[in-house]
Amino acid sequence: MEEQTQNQGSEKVYAGDGRNAGGYTGGNAGGYTGGNAGGGSYNGRSYKSSNGNKGNRMQGFIPGMIVGIIAAVIAVGIAFAVTGAGGGNAASYNLPGVSDSAVNNESIEKLSALEEYIDYYYYKSSEVSRQDKEDGLYKGLFESLGDVYSCYYTPEEYQKLTEETEGVYYGIGAYVSKDVETGASTVSGVIKNSPAEAAGLMEGDIIYEVDGEDMTGLELEEVVSHIRGPEGTKVKLTLIRGGDTIEVELTRAQVNSPTVESEMLEDGIGYLQITEFDNVTVDQFHENFRSLKEQGMKGMIIDLRGNPGGNVSTVCAIAEELLPEGLIFYMEDKNGERTEYTCNGADFDLPLVVLVNEYSASAAEILSGAIKDAGIGKLVGKKTFGKGIVQNVIGLDDGSAIKLTIANYYTRNGNDIHLKGIEPDVEVELDSDAYLEDKTDTQLNKAIEVMKEEMK
């Protein structure tokens, strides 16, 4: 899950999947406001601080083939959605000093010496600018944390992130995940009616080269930055698919990412899939939810398989439509400060089943965990990913930004899911072979079976 924006400089807090390449949003879904110690609201609903201070099922969704969970959407590199920071100037550097600082006379002297070695010995030193080296220093500091969710954004990277939150982006329309074990950037989904779909990109394709440049070992956002670009320009991808090397040339275009789709199944069972929790997701959810109810829905299946997360305000707004009054989830920082997110209670009393798998993360886990804890629905599928931490994005006064993990979050009943995940009520594997052969979705079939029992 991803976001809580705060009225403090340009800070933005994410409890998301850690996607490091910008974000798709569009329209104003009613962002989160408030946010310092006293509390605040999102979409008119209150929260309080306790201390007083990838594609859809109809498009060929095969969640079992998604690699990793550090995902980015290269619909131009969209990733976690951001709603805007509620005004204020960018954060300055006026912070308390560090007691055991790595930035000291000795380290500065050593850095100067290392730079001289690079300038004297490195065979392409003339191609490395001063700014490149400075950015490398900042990025290296964050890499020292050993936290894949914390990073430094250059002004250009942060600007791209900001632009993407406005909902207009250009690229090829493919979801990409980075396998945390192999480091390979892999296509994990393709957006409908996108250049990627037209070129025949498939889930599982490994992105080996972009315009002839080797992507091996690069960070996800670097791979994304190579693929994205102005509308109408071309990009050449070299892919590895099943041991074969494939080259495709695509023309970048404006890509619209549907995050919610639905259909009415047999016996009045409504099926609603949420692929991620972006700003646009709230309106899309309401539209699809309303359509299913108008069609006489008697029970609902929410499909969160492969959903890598999204922003806090979105998942809370959706939870508000489903949960009884009470807690949605809460965060707790390193000082033990607890921030709660609550809902007023929804007029929803239909049988509910939620599909999850090992790639359902963050916001998907907040929603599924709240539904399970509240006892209003059954979870079907596989144990979820297990990301129970939040990140804060802070814009700095030189146009750059940083993203830091700042808290753990806990489910409605106080469960710590980080690195543990949420166990489904009914466990069932996805038979990928059957799906590839004739689109048989064993997990969805089980969800329908569970739903029919609940509807009796």
Image (cartoon, rainbow, N blue to C red):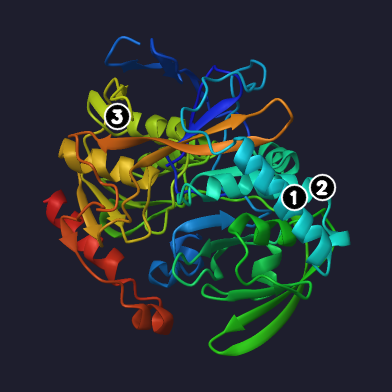
User: x and y percent of residue 242 in the render?
Assistant: 53, 87
Q: CA distance from mark 1 to mark 3?
A: 40 Å
Q: Which mark is residue 133?
A: 1
User: x and y percent of residue 245 in the render?
Assistant: 65, 87
**Residue 26 in sight from this viewpoint:** no
- The answer to whether 456 appears left or right of 208 in the picture is left
Which residue is drawn at the image coordinates 23% and 23% (left, top)?
A: 325
Q: Residues within 10 Å of mark 2 (few under 14, many from 20)?
A: few
Q: Which mark is residue 330?
A: 3
Label 3: element kind: strand
User: From the viewer's perspective, is residue 200 above or below residue 330?
Assistant: below
User: x and y percent of residue 376 in the render?
Assistant: 18, 39
Q: Determine whether label 1 and label 2 are within 8 Å by CB.
A: yes
Which residue is drawn at the image coordinates 47% and 64% (left, top)?
A: 58
Q: Amino acid at mark 2?
A: Arg
Q: Amino acid at mark 3?
A: Tyr
Q: CA distance from mark 1 to mark 2?
A: 5 Å
User: From the viewer's perspective, is residue 138 above or below residue 64?
Assistant: above
User: From the viewer's perspective, is residue 441 above or below residue 371?
Assistant: below
Name the quadrant containing residue 248.
bottom right
Q: Nearer the viewer, mark 1 or mark 3?
A: 1
Q: Which mark is residue 211?
A: none
Name the quadrant containing residue 57.
bottom left
Q: CA distance from mark 2 to mark 3?
A: 43 Å
**Residue 225 in sight from this viewpoint:** yes
Sequence-earlier tag: 2 or 3: 2
Q: Amino acid at mark 1?
A: Lys
Work out whether residue 31 or residue 320 is closer to the camera in this orientation and state it.
31
Q: What residue occupies the far right of the structure in this picture?
A: 126
Instruction: Identify the residue under disc 2.
Output: 130
Q: Quadrant of the N terminus?
A: top left
